[in-house]
DNA sequence: CGAATTTGACCGGCGC
DNA sequence: GCGCCGGTCAAATTCG
């Protein structure tokens, strides 16, 4: 968490190094300026007091917010622990069930599409009413918190409260990864160590950002497909959906052929994702936590910038600050001006 | 020149 | 039956 920044850190925007009260540094000033400065110094003392009071107030507020944040984090951790416990219990129950009752639903899936849409709807989005326990593992909750309600996900996980059809989950496993990407970077490329060939792009109904379709081109017969789309909630987040299992090992991540895909891959999003389909749940959980952390850092950074901008705006609105800035700058300019001119 | 990407067309499933 | 929508194909284009 980034609360350290909020709590008691000297504001970077205040360290402008202006040296507001530095009359000795000024040489060669006109009388008019001197008169203005005398007037201003009286005025300034009041303003400085007011500013200090304001600063104290803001600092106090900052401290309170920091405490609230800490409490929130503590509660979050507590909740996460509870959820993890619940998930473990549910998983144990489900494991027990699957060992006692044979997975009866051996009905072959009617069609390829049906299998896909079924598994995808389970995996991505909560357009369909799904049980709240559909997300398995605390990491997914973390992702939900970080990305937004639309991104609730279940990555090829057996849901305890749902009848599980093994034949639907096994053959084409679906896993989802959230990758933080530069919003300026329009390429829907997720660098994950594999080699992908793009075979389509489509704008979908529920998201204005196009969805790109990739096939694994590392091995000729590799059935793995990947869909990449920017999150509707946060365009800096790329949502990569992997389908199927690779029939080959993971290639070396550094240079994969030197073709365009390689170049685009290296230019794409920073990878914080798990290996696609044959992924171990815990590993994915770990990666999702990393992604969440990344998102939080990005949010904190944005907040920081916003705060800095607000402070800058407040300061620039303040005529006293402007006057002080002008006098400081003029003094500095005069200082730097060669005496010969 | 070959391989990868782009993009409009087409196909099949699904809901009304 | 029809229209919508997601997924895929394949010709055209781009790029190294």
Image (cartoon, coloured by chain):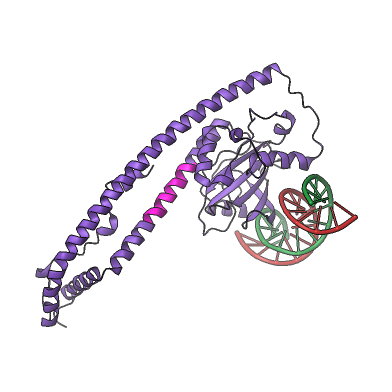
Chain colours: A purple, B green, C red
Q: Position of residue A47 (x, y in %)?
A: 19, 65
Dividing the picture into quadrants, the one containing residue A293 is top left
Q: Determine the residue positioned at 66% across, 38% down.
A: A122
Left or right, A303 with reference to A100: left
Along the viewing direction, whichever of A6 and A178 lies nearer the viewer: A6
Where does the magenta region start and end? Answer: A291-305
Location of the N terminus of chain A (image quadrant): top left
| Residue A297 shown in magenta | yes
Relative height, residue A108 to residue A98 (above, below)? below
Along the viewing direction, whichever of A335 and A315 lies nearer the viewer: A315
Residue furthest out toward the top: A100
Quick check: can you spot residue A20? Answer: no
| Residue A19 shown in magenta | no
Location of the C terminus of chain A (image quadrant): bottom left
Q: Position of residue A201 (x, y in %)?
A: 68, 55
Along the viewing direction, whichever of A268 and A132 lies nearer the viewer: A132
Quick check: can you spot residue A308? Answer: yes
Q: Determine the residue positioned at 39% across, 53% down.
A: A303
Left or right, A317 with reference to A174: left
Q: Position of residue A334 (x, y in %)?
A: 17, 76
Type of secondary structure dominating the magenta stretch: helix
Left or right, A70 with reference to A195: left
Dividing the picture into quadrants, the one containing residue A170 is top right
Q: Position of residue A163 (x, y in %)?
A: 70, 28
């Amino acid at each position: 968490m980034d609360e350290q920044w909020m709590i008691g850190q000297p504001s970077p925007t205040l360290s402008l190094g202006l040296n507001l009260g530095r009359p000795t540094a000024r040489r060669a000033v006109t009388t008019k300026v001197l008169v203005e400065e005398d007037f201003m110094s009286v005025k300034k003392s009041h303003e400085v007091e007011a500013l200090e009071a304001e600063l104290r107030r803001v600092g106090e507020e900052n401290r309170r917010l920091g405490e609230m944040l800490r409490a929130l984090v503590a509660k979050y951790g507590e909740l996460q622990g509870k959820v993890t416990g619940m998930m473990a219990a549910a998983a144990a129950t489900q494991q027990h069930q699957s060992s006692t009752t044979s997975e009866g639903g051996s009905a072959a899936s009617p069609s390829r599409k049906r299998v896909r849409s079924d598994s995808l709807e389970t995996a991505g989005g909560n357009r369909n009413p799904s049980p709240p326990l559909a997300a398995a593992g605390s990491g997914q909750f973390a992702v939900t918190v970080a990305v937004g309600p639309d991104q609730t996900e279940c990555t090829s996980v057996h849901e305890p409260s749902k009848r599980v059809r093994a034949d639907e989950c096994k053959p084409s496993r679906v896993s989802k990864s959230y990758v933080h990407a530069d919003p300026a970077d329009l390429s829907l490329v997720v660098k994950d160590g594999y080699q992908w060939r793009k075979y389509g792009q489509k704008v979908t109904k529920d998201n204005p950002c196009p969805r790109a379709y990739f096939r694994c081109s590392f091995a000729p017969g590799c059935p793995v497909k990947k869909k990449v789309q920017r999150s509707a909630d946060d365009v800096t987040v790329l949502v990569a959906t992997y389908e199927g299992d690779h029939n080959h090992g993971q290639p070396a991540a550094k240079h994969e052929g030197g073709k365009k895909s390689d170049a685009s891959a290296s230019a794409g999003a920073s990878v914080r994702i798990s290996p696609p389909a044959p992924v171990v749940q815990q590993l994915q959980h770990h990666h999702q936590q990393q992604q969440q952390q990344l998102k939080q850092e990005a949010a904190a950074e944005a907040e920081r910038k916003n705060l800095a901008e607000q402070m800058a705006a407040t300061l620039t609105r303040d005529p006293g600050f402007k006057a002080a800035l002008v006098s400081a700058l003029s003094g500095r300019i005069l200082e730097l001006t060669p005496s010969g001119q």
